Amino acid sequence: MDKKLIFLDIDGTLTAPGSNEPPASALEAIRLAQQAGHKVFLCSGRNYDMLRPLLGFGFDGAVASGGGYVFMGERVLYDCPMTEEQKERALRLFAEGGVLRTIEAKDASWCDEGMGQFLQQVSGGNSELLRWREALEKDLGIRPMKEYDGRPIYKVVFMCAKPEQLAPAIRELEGEFYFLVQDLAGANCLNGELINRKFDKGSGIRQICEALDCSVEDTIGFGDSMNDLEMIQTVGTGVCMANGSPNLKKQSDLVCPSVQEDGLAWAFRELGLVKSNKN
């Protein structure tokens, strides 16, 4: 088959939410796919710092920060943090609405005090919500907001109890930013990401395709939540995990077993990226 570029979301797709340990079956499938000549990239809302524990597994590069920072090996293809004015305006509007914020630079993250207590009160939720709960509980380097040192920010993750808390920020910022609100079945909160309209996961994929002189038709993307929508809509073949968003499944070409059920390994075999071990 033609050589493919494979793009993997992390939380809820490559790993269980909040984890940095992919299943052995997924790592083996990735290794075999690379040996067959395919290239495998991370494609995540995580910043570079949160990707770092996974980069040691030998990925060919990543679309990080939801498309705001894109690299292959040591080569940076795209780097687009918020302007200072955008950052200050967004943080002010969220704070005025009582919206809890986690801000992400390339190499560090900070969150508002009270985030952990708020999450403890939330019931239900999807993999993104679980990721932040796990991240806070396991201390994955997310620092208190009072320690923020002013470095450039690529993304804001927001959480609040009611839609009206977000309304002022949406009115003022939606011309410049996407408000990617997650599907939260049964959860009593809103959880999402503020992403610059200058980029998304799909634009990051196209940049890597251009750098490698590869057709977008020869790409495959794996995701589980609605912040993967642009990826799924961009790639030649979109795959959603069984544990993923019902709305994303409708947009995908294939639904594979969950991350806990060795879904990536199954899909790599199903799509012919690796040879099946069946006789």
Image (cartoon, grey):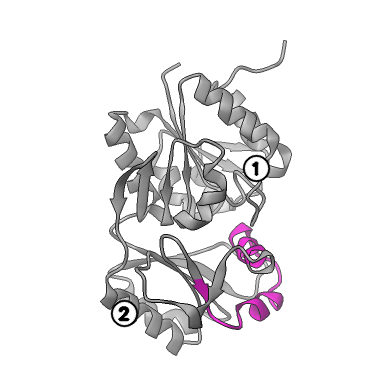
The answer to whether residue 152 is left or right of residue 97 is left
Q: Which residues are magenta?
A: 110-135
* The furthest residue to the bottom: 96
Tell me, yes or no, whether the two marked residues, 1 and 2, touch with CB atoms within 8 Å: no
User: SS for tag 1?
Assistant: loop
Q: Can the viewer see residue 166 in this picture?
A: yes
Residues packed near mark 2 inside 10 Å, few (<14), some (14 to 19) or many (20 plus): few
**Which residue bears the numbered disc 1?**
22
Q: Can the viewer see residue 45 in this picture?
A: no
The answer to whether residue 252 is left or right of residue 279 is left
**Residue sitting at x 67%, y 38%:** 257
**Which residue bears the numbered disc 2?**
172
* Residue 61 circle label: none
Q: Could you tell me residue 106's position as x and y percent?
A: 41, 60
**Residue sitting at x 41%, y 44%:** 233
In the image, which is nearer the foreground, mark 1 or mark 2?
A: 1
User: SS for tag 2?
Assistant: helix
